[in-house]
């Protein structure tokens, strides 16, 4: 009787080097995403520059952000221009001053309209946020 040598079957095993490479790539992507994607608060804006810009002192203030496409936010929450004053009043006296954080591409007329509505609502401590040149 004649016999043939059967090929030796290799056992399946897990390669560690490609698995370590994949884990390192995942770690790098998670670090990069966590550093760049999470916005601080509200809309991303490019503040206009001013030579006389000053550092804000720690105090209670509300941040009103004017963005492109007529977007308006109060402390990171979307609001409409009609409800802005009523929402500020509903917060009580906790927020004493208002900081207007406007994108440099927002028309000045829109900024002035928001400031007018705030002043007519009884708020007098209004500042405009800029970056130092």
Image (cartoon, helix red, strand yellow):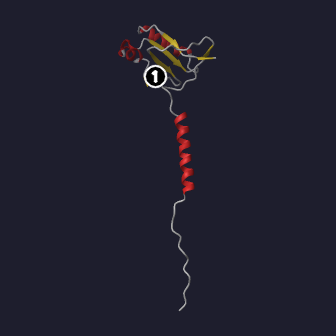
Q: Secondary structure at mark 1?
A: strand
Q: Residue at x 52, y 23 (%)?
A: 67
Give 64 or 36, whichever is nearer the viewer: 36
Give 120 or 127, whichever is nearer the viewer: 127
- Please tell me how crowded label 1 is: few (under 14), some (14-19), or many (20+) other residues with Cα within 10 Å: many
- Residue found at the very far bottom of the displayed protein: 1
Q: Residue at x 41, y 14 (%)?
A: 95
Which quadrant holds the C terminus? top right
Q: Position of residue 80 (x, y in %)?
A: 43, 21
Give 96 or 107, whichever is nearer the viewer: 96
**Is 21 located above or below residue 83 in the figure?**
below
Q: Which residue is mark 1?
A: 73
Q: Is 113 left, or right, of 89 in this rendering?
A: right
**Is 3 located above or below residue 115 in the figure?**
below
Q: Position of residue 29 (x, y in %)?
A: 55, 42
Q: Position of residue 6 (x, y in %)?
A: 54, 80
**Is 36 located above or below residue 125 in the figure?**
below
Q: Residue at x 57, y 16 (%)?
A: 130
Give 26 or 88, whichever is nearer the viewer: 26
Q: Position of residue 94 (x, y in %)?
A: 38, 14
Q: How many numbered dots are placed on residues in this image?
A: 1
**Is 110 located above or below residue 24 in the figure?**
above
Q: Residue at x 56, y 84 (%)?
A: 4
Tell me where residue 106 sits by quadrant. Answer: top right
Q: Is 60 left, or right, of 52 in this rendering?
A: left
């Amino acid at each position: 009787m004649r016999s043939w040598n059967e090929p030796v079957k290799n056992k399946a095993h897990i390669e560690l080097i490609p698995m370590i490479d994949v884990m390192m790539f995942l770690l790098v992507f998670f670090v990069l995403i966590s550093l760049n994607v999470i916005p601080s608060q509200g809309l991303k804006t490019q503040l206009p520059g001013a030579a006389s810009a000053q550092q804000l002192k720690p105090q209670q203030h509300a941040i009103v952000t004017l963005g492109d496409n007529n977007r308006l936010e109060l402390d990171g929450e979307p609001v409409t221009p009609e409800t802005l004053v009523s929402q500020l009043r509903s917060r009580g006296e906790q927020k004493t001053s208002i900081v207007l954080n406007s994108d440099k591409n927002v028309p000045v007329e829109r900024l002035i309209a928001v400031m007018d509505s705030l002043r007519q609502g009884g708020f007098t401590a209004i500042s405009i946020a800029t970056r130092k040149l």
